[in-house]
Image: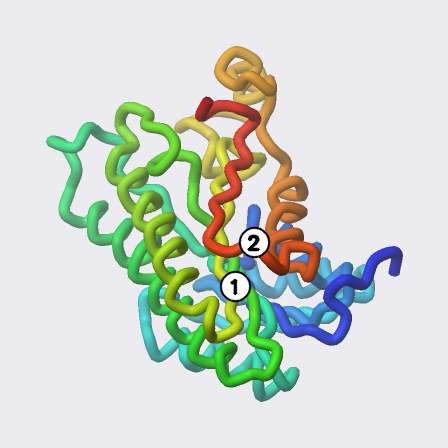
């Protein structure tokens, strides 16, 4: 393989059945890591595993819900029992709900956003750090936030933005709490990327491409591979002194 930055290391990726999570899992596997992917849909996870195996990567899947503490604890145990350690964790699982103004937001949508985007990151982070701080070499965690929230506001996305701003705050606070334990914690904040989440209702990929030429200074969405490369950098030894940062990947949309 051309690169092997993560040879001999174990990586955990939540939300690994599609989109950015899948791209991250495949990128780590391509660089020699043993990867555990988690998500709520077995078929999607199995597809990620098959794609990795097709290129010689090592990826195993486990169905898990990030909003359940027991699932997150079990997920970390699986990584350690299977591969001997947990060196990198990428907390990517997230949902978008409630594309309405705040006054029209339903209780159900608000709770879904908090359960997955906020509580889910906290529970995953807690389980991961508890393991990493017992290891001689510690570990690295990358949380996937968004340019919406801490960096930008868009009408009708306020609830989602609030949940992702919470991820940014969790990242900074946890980074300070645990760098002394040898655990580096950072975040990436993608803007519109080549996933279904950036499509408007009924919009095609081609229609999104036309819209982004007007809406984004870059003139396009980010590819999932571009986001994955940023994640790999933050998890790598090259970023050994990068702690508590929030790397925005949005083609200048939030400037």
Residue at (56% x, 54% y) in the render = 242
Is 157 positioned to the left or the right of 91 in the image? left
Q: Earlier in the sequence, mark 2 or mark 1?
A: 1
Mark 1 residue crowding within 10 angstroms, few (<14) / some (14–19) / many (20+): many
Name the secondary structure under disc 2.
loop
Is 123 positioned to the left or the right of 205 in the image? left
Mark 2 residue crowding within 10 angstroms, few (<14) / some (14–19) / many (20+): some
Residues tagged 2 and 1 counted as in contact (Cβ below 8 A): yes
Outermost residue on the right side: it is: 2
Outermost residue on the top side: it is: 214
Relative height, residue 219 to residue 135 (above, below):
above
Nearer-the-camera pick, 196 or 9: 9
Whole-percent x, y for residue 98 in the image: 26, 38
Name the secondary structure under disc 1.
strand
Whole-percent x, y for residue 77 in the image: 50, 84
Residue at (54% x, 65% y) in the render = 89
Q: CA distance from mark 2 to mark 1?
A: 8 Å
Identify the disc placed on residue 164.
none
Whole-percent x, y for residue 197 in the image: 45, 38
Is 86 positioned to the left or the right of 116 in the image? right
Relative height, residue 71 to residue 5 (above, below):
below
Which image quadrant is residue 125 in? bottom left
Which image quadrant is residue 71 in? bottom left
**Which residue was labeled with disc 1?**
184
Whole-percent x, y for residue 79 in the image: 57, 79
Quarter of the picture containing the N terminus is: bottom right
Relative height, residue 15 to residue 59 (above, below):
above
Relative height, residue 249 to residue 170 (above, below):
above
Residue at (71% x, 68% y) in the render = 33
**Which residue was labeled with disc 2?**
242
Is 182 positioned to the left or the right of 108 in the image? right
């Amino acid at each position: 393989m051309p690169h092997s930055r993560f040879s001999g290391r174990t990586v955990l990726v939540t939300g690994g059945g599609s989109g950015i999570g899948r791209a991250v899992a495949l990128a780590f596997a391509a660089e020699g890591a043993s990867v555990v992917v988690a998500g709520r849909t077995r078929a999607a996870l199995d597809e990620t595993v098959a794609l990795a195996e097709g290129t010689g990567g090592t990826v195993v899947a486990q169905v898990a819900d990030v909003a359940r503490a027991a699932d997150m604890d079990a997920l970390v145990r699986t990584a350690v029992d299977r591969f001997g350690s947990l060196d990198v964790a990428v907390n990517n699982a997230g949902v978008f709900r409630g594309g309405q103004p705040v006054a029209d937001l339903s209780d159900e949508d608000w709770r879904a956003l908090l359960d997955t985007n906020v509580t889910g990151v906290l529970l995953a982070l807690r389980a991961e750090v508890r393991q990493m701080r017992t290891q001689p070499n510690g570990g690295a965690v990358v949380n996937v936030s968004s340019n919406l929230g801490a960096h930008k506001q868009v009408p009708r996305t306020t609830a989602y933005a609030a949940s992702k701003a919470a991820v940014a705050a969790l990242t900074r606070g946890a980074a300070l709490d645990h760098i002394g334990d040898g655990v580096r914690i950072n975040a990436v904040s993608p803007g519109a990327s080549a996933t279904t989440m950036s499509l408007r209702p009924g919009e095609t990929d081609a229609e999104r491409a036309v819209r982004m030429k007007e809406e984004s200074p870059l003139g396009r969405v980010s590819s999932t591979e571009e986001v994955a490369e940023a994640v790999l950098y933050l998890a790598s030894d090259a970023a050994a002194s990068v702690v508590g940062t929030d790397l925005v990947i949005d083609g200048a949309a939030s400037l």
